[in-house]
Image (cartoon, helix red, strand yellow):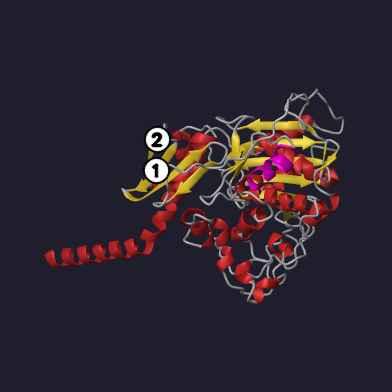
Amino acid sequence: MKKSLKYLLIIALLCFLYLGYRYYPALNIVTGYASKNMASGLFLADRHQASMEKGDNGFLPINFASYVIDENEKSVSSSIFGLMKRKAIYVEGLGAILVNDEFDDKRKFKVPNRFKYRDTLAFPFGDLSQKDTLFKEVNYEKLQKAVDKAFDLQGEKKQQTRSVLVVYKNQIIGEKYAEGFDKNSLMHGWSMTKSLTSAMYGILQKQNRIDINDQTGIEAWAKDERKQITYNDLLHMNSGLEWEEAYFNISDVTKMLYLKSDMGQVQIENPLVGEPDQLWNYSSGTTNILSGPLLREEFDSHQEYLDFWYGELIDKIGMHSAVIETDLAGNYIGSSYAWATTRDWAKFGLLYLNEGNWNGEQVLDSSWVQYTRTPTNTSEGRYGAQFWLNAGGYHPDVPKDMYSCNGFKGQYVFIIPSRDLVVVRTGLVSDPKFDVNGFLQNIIESID
């Protein structure tokens, strides 16, 4: 008996050592995610710690994290069983920034200027209440049932929808929020941020500051085949660069988001594994090349770069709630970290629904909108220029002209030109657990 117990203890110790060896490096990513997400939730989105722990950070292995919150410093430190402590700080205007041991706590950050105007217009061109408009072609009872069906019943935790907004012909015809959220709640867009990054290049193209068919001119690529990569290839996720986009293990994307201070440099260092325009591969690293070093070099100063996103797009279309967070190098994390209210996310969708025109001003050329929704080579009709497409009929009961901004855990802005519709859904569960096809089908069928 004693000998058997001894062997069991040895086996248990060996297992413990193996698991520690295997998973200890991942703790740095886990605590990085936990502290960064908690700081954004508390100080940017004005959420409560209990709500964040139960919801956004309430899944394995993130829910093993413990937190130390400093309200005065506006910081969150996280660890697991006292190991791998990570810290995120909140900077007004920039959001929550994950810092490292080399961070100088006396550092002064540049922050973007915001361009807010006196609000005298109703949604979507302002934030005042709309006049009651009833469309005879809308079956409002059927629509309400479609919206309600997207939410969990009392006590359920299946779909975990937080908000749904339905906009038809620029008018809100359906809107609902889960308990604890309302029209003023900031919603984390995750990879919907990629679509904002794409729009910035549409504006640069409209201003004749770039030609997306030109090579990027990235210095690190000048002496090898990567020099052939164009802006167009990057926008289409079709660069041929190596990348692993896996969120629940140690991968390129998790190392970039939670270990790197300058996220735009990560994908630049990767080799080619295919020819440009011949190998579609979804890559947040590619987007951060676009939103960081490439876009920043278009401006004479860091301040101009920071202001450009808000002055030329975000505040121009009245997304005044929106904040795009930066990395420690001061670059916008264009792959993953934009926050906005559900209504403001809808405004971005409406800009595209209206062919780039915003209340009479052509913010984006209509040709750019068409480019955005044109399928990328080798994507099987699923992807355009940082937008997801239904051109190949992936959602069989939804019009093929539907295209969308999609984010981690089921954040969506659906744009359906043939139905004059924009639909926003936010939550904690994505397709197929949240049935996108059925959700949109039910909404569409409520409008004759």
**As shown in the figure, which amino acid type bears the numbered disc 1?**
Ser
Quarter of the image with the N terminus is bottom left
Disc number for residue 244 = none
Q: Which residues are magenta?
A: 305-316
Which sits in the foreground, 270 or 104?
Answer: 104
Q: Which SS type dominates the magenta stretch?
A: helix
| Mark 2 lies on residue | 70
Lower sequence index among marks 1 and 2? 2
- Residue 183 lies, in percent from the top left, at 64, 30
Query: Does 183 sit above or below residue 290?
Result: above
| Mark 1 lies on residue | 77
Which sits in the foreground, 105 or 54?
Answer: 105
Check the image and name the residue furthest to the front.
300
Residue 373 in view: no
Q: Assess disc 1: are there few (<14), some (14-19) or many (≥20) residues with their C-alpha within 10 Å of its C-alpha.
A: many
- Residue 116 lies, in percent from the top left, at 69, 31
- Spatial CA distance of label 1 from label 2 is 8 Å
Q: Assess disc 2: are there few (<14), some (14-19) or many (≥20) residues with their C-alpha within 10 Å of its C-alpha.
A: few
Quarter of the image with the C terminus is top right
